[in-house]
Image: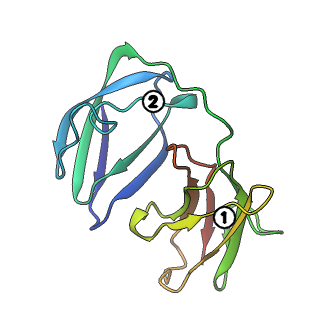
């Protein structure tokens, strides 16, 4: 069983969770507390993505339990996933003293920069000519230096970039 909770007041992005399941595995909702998943919607029967990873949006104050089924669904053919690039000279897990800028590439408009799974505060991104984008990460509320933060780009097709983790 896969179990996920969102104890927050807004929707949360659970991105790239390793499941140990084969890609295309259809999951069945065994428990849905909080907002009820739409019948036949992606929250009711999510499909494990490439590499066995699961990406879903959890409604505010919700709990989900999914069970793997024997059913398989083909993964849709898609273009390139959104790309997120750390600031020049910053490695994974970098420590920042203040706000900083992330960038990357997008194939289409409609993507959002999501920090710490917080969809309510996700920044809309628009590709510039050539597909590049940039966005400032506001660190004012990130006051605990021991917390590792996580940024991803969520495309309008539900695909996510590789994550970038950092501390403030």
Residue 159, located in which quarter of the rendered image?
Answer: top right
Q: Secondary structure at mark 2?
A: loop
Q: Residue furthest right?
A: 89
Q: Residues within 10 Å of mark 2 (few under 14, many from 20)?
A: many
Q: Is residue 122 above or below residue 82?
A: below
Q: Residue at x 48, y 48 (%)?
A: 15
Q: Residue 93 got which mark?
A: 1
In this picture, residue 65 sits left or right of residue 72: left
First-in-chain label (1 vs 2): 2
Q: Residue at x 76, y 69 (%)?
A: 87
In this picture, residue 54 sits left or right of residue 45: right
Q: Residue at x 18, y 42 (%)?
A: 32
Q: Residue at x 48, y 66 (%)?
A: 122
Q: CA distance from mark 1 to mark 2?
A: 27 Å
- In percent of width and height, residue 139 lies at 56, 81
Q: Is residue 72 above or below residue 123?
A: above
The answer to whether residue 85 is seen in the rendering is: no
Q: Quickly name the residue at label 2.
A: 48
Q: Residues within 10 Å of mark 1 (few under 14, many from 20)?
A: some
In this picture, residue 132 sits left or right of residue 46: right
**Does the residue at mark 1 contact the one at mark 2 (Cβ under 8 Å)?**
no
- In percent of width and height, residue 150 lies at 55, 62
Question: Which dot, 1 or 2, sits closer to the camera?
Answer: 2
Is 32 in front, or is 37?
37
């Amino acid at each position: 069983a896969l179990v996920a909770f969102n104890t927050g007041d807004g929707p949360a992005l659970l991105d790239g969770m390793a499941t140990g399941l084969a890609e295309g595995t259809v999951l069945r909702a065994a428990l849905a507390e909080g907002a009820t998943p739409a019948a036949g919607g992606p929250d009711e029967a999510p499909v494990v993505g490439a590499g066995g990873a699961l990406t879903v949006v959890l409604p505010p104050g919700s709990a989900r339990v999914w069970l793997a089924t024997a059913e398989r669904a083909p993964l849709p053919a898609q273009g390139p996933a959104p790309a997120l690039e750390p600031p020049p000279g910053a490695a994974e897990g970098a420590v920042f003293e203040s706000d900083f800028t992330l960038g990357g590439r997008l194939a289409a408009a409609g993507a959002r920069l999501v920090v710490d799974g917080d969809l309510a505060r996700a920044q809309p991104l628009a590709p510039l000519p050539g597909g590049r984008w940039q966005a400032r990460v506001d660190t004012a509320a990130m006051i605990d230096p021991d917390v590792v933060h996580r940024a991803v780009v969520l495309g309008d097709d539900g695909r996510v970039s590789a994550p970038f983790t950092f501390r403030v």
